Image: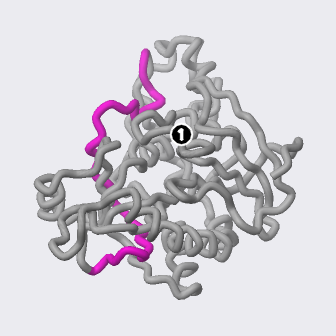
Amino acid sequence: MARRKVKARADVGIIGGSGLYDIEGLRDVGHVTVRTPFGAPSDAIVLGELDGIPIAFLSRHGGGHRIGPGEINYRANIYALKSLGVRRVISVSAVGSMKESIKPGDIVLPDQFIDLTKHRVSTFFEGGIVAHVGFAEPVCGNMSASLFEGAQSIGASVHRGGVYLCIEGPQFSTKGESRLYRQWGVSVIGMTNMPEAKLAREAELCYATVALATDYDCWHESEGPVTVEVILTTLRKNVALAKQLLRVSAGAVVAVKTCGCQQALQDAVVTAPDRIPARLRRKLRLLLDRAMPPTTRGG
């Protein structure tokens, strides 16, 4: 893709995971390098139009897949998309299936998460400001419904709902861990949607995951242990399907009206306005301006 200057605005943000490094059908393509108070995002953001809809695409692992799941600057990624005007984020992720009914090649649209990550910063609000956002329903139901209809329209084997278990990685699970997770009733296992989903909620962005099942982790007795080779073989087919899904669903996703996701910070900041350091007000202005207008922020 040729790099050129573009209007740095988008309605929908797409975060591509393993195997999804570009979006087919994107027109008027350009790149923008975004600076954030939290450092650099994973890569330059690709801007363009998908059937007339302004799209921002970010490769989660960076060009050439050089950033591991525990090294991703999740705050910078979400902040960068927010700064471009994005209000809805579709996260595409390769996952392992934890259920017999979810076969490699299937698409899963989880509606819940379990976070087992250990070393990742999971909030924008720290160092002198505290916020508690609601996270009981971590996925935007309206977006998930649109993606489900889109998946059905292209004939995908799709599962709506389920629990995404996020582990730290980058190693795969032991058999003991995999068997334990199965007892918990989780649907899929991955390494990247946490704290991404939490930060999207704090940034008041609608968020939904398109999980691409590539393997059975290591619990399935008739299947060999998961390997990169196994994942990549299935992933090539999954990614082609995901690209179709994104194209047929973009219009419906952008048509989603304002929902509770985009009001998440309302009354969530518990720090007294006059006790919030000025440097933090400046740093978090993009996030605070709607929930805490300047007249209510003190100082």
Q: Is residue 189 left or right of residue 222?
A: right
Q: In terms of secondary structure, what is the magenta stretch mainly?
A: loop
- Observer able to see residue 27: yes
Viewer-side residue, 16 vs 223:
223
Q: Quadrant of residue 25?
A: bottom right
Q: Secondary structure at mark 1?
A: loop
Would you place residue 239 above or below residue 80 in this image? below
Q: Quadrant of residue 286?
A: top right
Magenta span: 101-127
Can you say which quadrant of the picture contains the C terminus? Answer: top right
Give percent across and percent down for residue 35: 68, 28
- Observer able to see residue 290: no
Give percent across and percent down for residue 82: 64, 42
Q: Which residue is mark 1?
A: 66
Q: What amino acid does circle 1 point to? A: Arg
Q: Residue at x 48, y 36 (%)?
A: 72
The type of colouring in the image is one colour
Q: Residue at x 52, y 74 (%)?
A: 237
Q: Is residue 105 magenta?
A: yes
Give percent across and percent down for residue 94: 44, 60
Q: Quadrant of residue 137?
A: bottom left
Q: Residue at x 53, y 39 (%)?
A: 66
Viewer-side residue, 136 vs 165:
165
Q: Residue at x 28, y 34 (%)?
A: 118
Badge 1, how many Cα within 10 Å: few under 14, some, many 20+?
Answer: few
Give percent across and percent down for residue 33: 73, 35
Would you place residue 296 above or below residue 134 in this image? above
